[in-house]
Image (cartoon, helix red, strand yellow):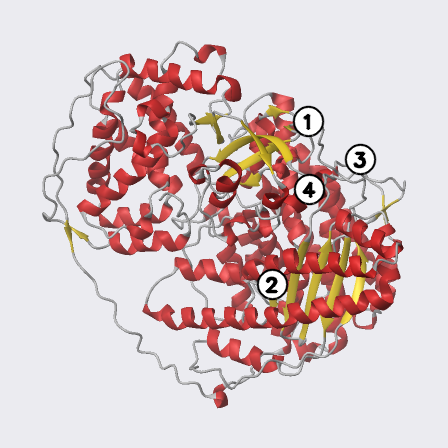
Amino acid sequence: MGDCHRPRCRNTFTQNIFKYLTGTIMATQQFETPFSDTLYGQTIEKESEFKTNYSLVFQVAEDSPFSRTYNPGLFQQNTSLAQEEFVSLLAELNNREFAETLFDLAHEFESHLEEEVKIEFFDGESQIVKSKFKKYIDPVVTETHAMIDKVSDFFTENQFSEASETEFELYLQNLEFEHIRFSPAQEQFLGKVFDKVKSVAKKGIELAKKGVNAVGKILPIQQVLEKIKGLVRPLLERILKFSIGKLPKNLQPHAQNLAKKFLKLEFEVYEFEGTDDLEAIQYEFDVQMTQYLFGGRHSSNELVTFEFEYFDEHATSPQVSKNDGESLHLAKSKLIQGLQSLEPDGDPTQLIENFLPVAIAALHPAIKIAINIAGRQRVIAFLADILAKLIRNYVPESVTKPLASSIIDLGMGAIGFEVHEQNRADLGYEAIVNTLEQTVRDLNLDSIQIDNENLASAFLESFEKAASENFPPKYIKEELRSEKTNGLWVAMPRSTPRKRYKKFSRVFDVVIPPRNLAVIKTFRGLPLANFLTDKYGIETNKPIKAKVHLYELLNGGRLDHISNAENIPGLNKSQPKSWVQLLPLTREASTIIFGEPTLGREVSPDDIRSRYQNEDGKRFYFLELEEAKLRIPAVNRSSHRHINSSIYSSITESRSADVQAVIDFIKAEIKFNYFFSEEDAKRIVEKLNKNDFTGTALSIRNSFKKVFEKMLKGNISSKVKIVHESIPELYLNYRDVQQEDFVGLANLVESAGQSLIRKIIEQIVEVLSQKAYHGVLEYFKTRAKEFKEAQAQPQDGVTLRVTWSNIVGLSTFRQVISTMLAKGPFGSLADLSVPQFRNPTIKIFPGKKFE
């Protein structure tokens, strides 16, 4: 209960809310509260009975009318060369490290702002904030424009159609830049944009050589580069909107629809709640650049530019965020003040009625839309009536002040309350409001069959859990105490009005044995043992002692908000990238570490595929390790040369093992990229230097079987990049989210097609994972010297790339996928055979080099 935040959970509620009609269905009923019979401050009075009237109309879904007959003769390949090249460039531009760079820029700017003006950063309309942000990005915009001009200069003296790609590459390698001292994040941004501009220009040369008739009307590359300059400032301004929570929540589908227009694919305006805002920013930027190259002289590129710059300012879709997080913060403050002002026997119903619409808009937009259609006031009044009766006895100050004292007693050591908070009732009212907020947030919408009784039951169940986490245990019935650890969750930071996260009031002293370190999973499914070795250089063949701090994100919160506000050894604003040490507190991890599963959250692999996903309710833990320090290797990641030959300091922590697959249906090529962390690579080289080939083989097997294969197979949606003219989204997780958000009979066939496409990708990954493993073993028998040379380079870690080219039979799967996504007839695929995979080629690269 309370762990379902994904869009598919919202669908059930969205559909069922439409079933509300006026009438009577619910009998008079008394609800039991989760609180114990002892009320510290006064005696509890039994709740009065209450009634509410609604009716329910049942809707029965019909069977799909679509044929499932498979006819191989219907597969046709109508893709143009321009569509193929469009998707290929889009895939080449996509680099998830670019999204990380955008995050670093946002974090860096917020940190500077707090230090310079000493204000809490959430007011994006503040002239001070806007002025500081302009000062921060102006030099970056200027230098990025200058960089693009230098690239464009090559084509002043070289005819576009006659330009040599080799000459152009040599020209780029010799380019040198001279600019003011940038921060590491600014420098990395400049380098990442430089890489994208190079890719666009190279693709332009390639297309020019293929002939205009083959690809359509392409713009002269100098005009394309000039247009790209116009995207830089709007791109950076997206970072400010990301920081203050004003990014359009349907940004990703908006960009995908732009791509689908060019590819002549069907598209819908999906109701999409993006959690990958930074990846959406990158995707939109990539689509715009690609469209500039392919748009032609008479295309709507000017309109496209306008949409990029002003889409979020003028959009009217209900999915566009209007800074709901900030509204929620203000609504909570107003509710606390209202409760404080109530007379001892006052009724809080109206206050809660005012609060609920704001909470629902911020925490469950899908419910907001449905409620607006079904009858907002009736639903809100019904829910407010329930919640008011549940908290009424805890509103009087005679009760709330002892409640606040109990909270302070429990959290004084871990939380560090402000002096002004002691001997006041404020914390008690805050606990009540936090409980109401969490009640709304943690509704298990997938389980609600809407009628009054079920809706009330769902709210009561959510309220019970929320109360048990926000009230001291002695206030809760023993059987309902979710954490039998004498603690509660307190909103943080205490020094500012806006709360970004919660912290558990108790710090745990734990000892984790090696066998548990190997099975506790962190982000991407990486074992905790690998994380500790890679990030700190800790040997994990003996038990690890640590103090464990627990956190939970609130609406609008991010992991770096936690690290900026905390002040404990290793996790504080003076430690660069300290937020990367926060690990997902899953039920599995909580059970293994504490023997208490309810401290953690139930998550899917997709929920923890990246630490850049920020969603309220997610929980994390930090291991405070004695004498351990996060390692940040001195690696130049700027990717371009400077006239003064200065080396910019790195802001990227030592990386852990990672894997990526790229299935390019257009080129009939598949690549598996395996990244060995610096520690893993060192261990392999040490064994090679001792001629310990058995030990080398064992290390490689451990990396493949215990890390790479599990990580890849467990994250198919996000770890496999798909280059296919019918999948401009590039990753299945974007298509999965869209499918979950859009319901109806017309999508039944697409849903079946989605499932089959996933099975095709899973089958290919399963087969090639084994072939790649054996290929790598053979590689080390004859070419181990190359690996040792790559590990000796200053870059962090080593990437090993396994490539299968000219795959016979992959084109058939390409056609099958096109037919499925076009909603064409399909059926049994039993006659399709696995493509023929010949021996792969293997290359080694210093550092992490994914595509």
- Left or right of 246, for residue 534: right
Residue behind mark 3: 181
Three-letter amino acid code at the position of disc 1 = Ser
Residue behind mark 2: 720
Of marks 3 and 2, which one's residue comes earlier in the chain? 3
Is residue 651 depicted above or below 46 in this figure? below
What residue lies at 73% left-to-right and 78% top-to-bottom? 211
Q: Residue 122 at x, y = what percent?
A: 51, 30
Three-letter amino acid code at the position of disc 4 = Thr
| Mark 1: few/some/many CA within 10 Å (<14, 14-19, 20+) | few
Residue 222 seen by the camera: no
Residue behind mark 4: 540
Comparing labels 4 and 1, the label whose residue is closer to the camera: 4
- Residue 574: assigned label: 1
Instruction: Name the secondary structure under disc 1.
Output: loop
Location of residue 140 by image quarter: top right
Give me the C-alpha separation between circle 4 and circle 1.
Answer: 27 Å
Is residue 405 depicted above or below 235 in this figure? above
Query: Contact, CB < 8 Å: mark 3 with mark 2?
Result: no
Decide which of 35, 701 is in the foreground and name it. 701
Three-letter amino acid code at the position of disc 3 = Arg
For the N terminus, the quadrant is top left
